[in-house]
Image: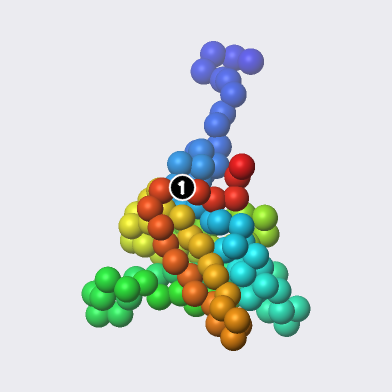
């Protein structure tokens, strides 16, 4: 190697690791994988979390065929979550969980701190 040459770190890979802000619980992983498992959906289908309408504090969650430009991608065990840039900052060090009630309705919750699938 010549002067000035050396090992290069892929800046996008390094940046991506620094930007992962949301932890998924095993419950959230299971629900997201179930919701996005339809074979008629594109393989990149995930859950997208974005800002609420008209400046509302509420977040909107929807099934998305792929991330939108500027979205941050969190993937855990095949469950994909796409975070709008502003939402990614808001959810820094938070945990996404999901519960299914006896009627089959899904409720997603966001809690303080990281308490995801890693044990």
Please identify the quadrant where the C terminus is shown.
Answer: top right
Q: Along the line of sight, which residue is nearer the eye, 40 or 60?
A: 60
**Residue 107 visible to the viewer:** yes
Give the residue at x 55% y 37%.
10
Give the residue at x 56% y 28%.
8
Residue 106: x, y in percent?
Answer: 54, 77
- Residue 28 higher or lower than 103, as above or below: above
The furthest residue to the right: 39
- Residue 85 higher or lower than 3, as above or below: below
Q: Secondary structure at mark 1?
A: loop
Please identify the quadrant where the N terminus is shown.
Answer: top right
Residue 97: x, y in percent?
Answer: 51, 62
Look at mark 1 in the image and give the residue it sits on.
Answer: 114
Give the residue at x 67% y 55%.
77
Image quadrant where residue 3 sits? top right
Numbered label tally: 1
The furthest residue to the bottom: 103
Give the residue at x 46% y 74%.
61
Q: Along the line of sight, which residue is nearer the eye, 50 or 113?
A: 113
Residue 33: x, y in percent?
Answer: 66, 68
- Residue 1 higher or lower than 111, as above or below: above
**Residue 69 visible to the viewer:** no
Image quadrant where residue 100 sits? bottom right
71 on left or right of 103? left
């Amino acid at each position: 190697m010549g002067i000035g040459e050396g090992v290069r770190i892929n800046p996008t890979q390094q940046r991506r690791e620094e930007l992962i802000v949301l932890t998924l619980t095993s419950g959230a992983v299971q629900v997201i994988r179930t919701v996005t498992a339809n074979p008629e959906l594109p393989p990149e289908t995930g859950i997208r979390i974005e800002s609420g309408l008209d400046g509302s504090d509420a977040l909107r969650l929807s099934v998305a065929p792929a991330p939108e430009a500027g979205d941050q991608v969190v993937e855990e065990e095949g469950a994909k979550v796409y975070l709008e840039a502003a939402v990614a900052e808001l959810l820094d060090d938070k945990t996404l969980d999901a519960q299914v009630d006896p009627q089959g309705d899904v409720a997603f919750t966001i809690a303080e701190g990281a308490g995801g699938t890693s044990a």
